Image: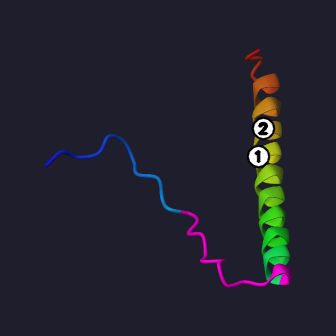
Amino acid sequence: MEEPEGPRKPNRFTPPVIDLWGVEELRAYIAELKEEIGRAEREIAKREASKAAADLFFRKG
């Protein structure tokens, strides 16, 4: 049996079954997802800013 190449990505999200949800439940779910997307985007921006500061400090470019 072959080993997979590199580390495996963890499954971070398992979508719920939404077939029986009402419209308001679906809207609330969308709002929660948008909040989580915003959180991820803020983390990306923070990391990019840190990298840019390090690059400037070490004059990489």
Give the class, few, some or many, for how many residues have Cα within 10 Å of label 2's Cα (few <14, many ≥20).
few
Does 12 sit left or right of 38 as displayed? left
Residue depicted at x 78% and y 75%: 29
Amino acid carrying label 1: it is Ile
Instruction: Determine the secondary structure under disc 2.
Output: helix
User: In this picture, is 5 found above or below 1?
Assistant: above
Query: Taken as a whole, is the magenta stretch helix, strand or loop?
Result: loop
**Magenta segment:** 12-24
The residue beneath circle 2 is 48
9 above or below 53?
A: below
- Under circle 1, the secondary element is helix
Labelled disc at residue 44: 1
Residue lying at the far left in this picture: please name it: 1
Protein image colouring: rainbow
Q: Is residue 14 magenta?
A: yes
Judged from this view, the residue extending furthest toward the top is 61
Depth order, front residue of 48/60: 48
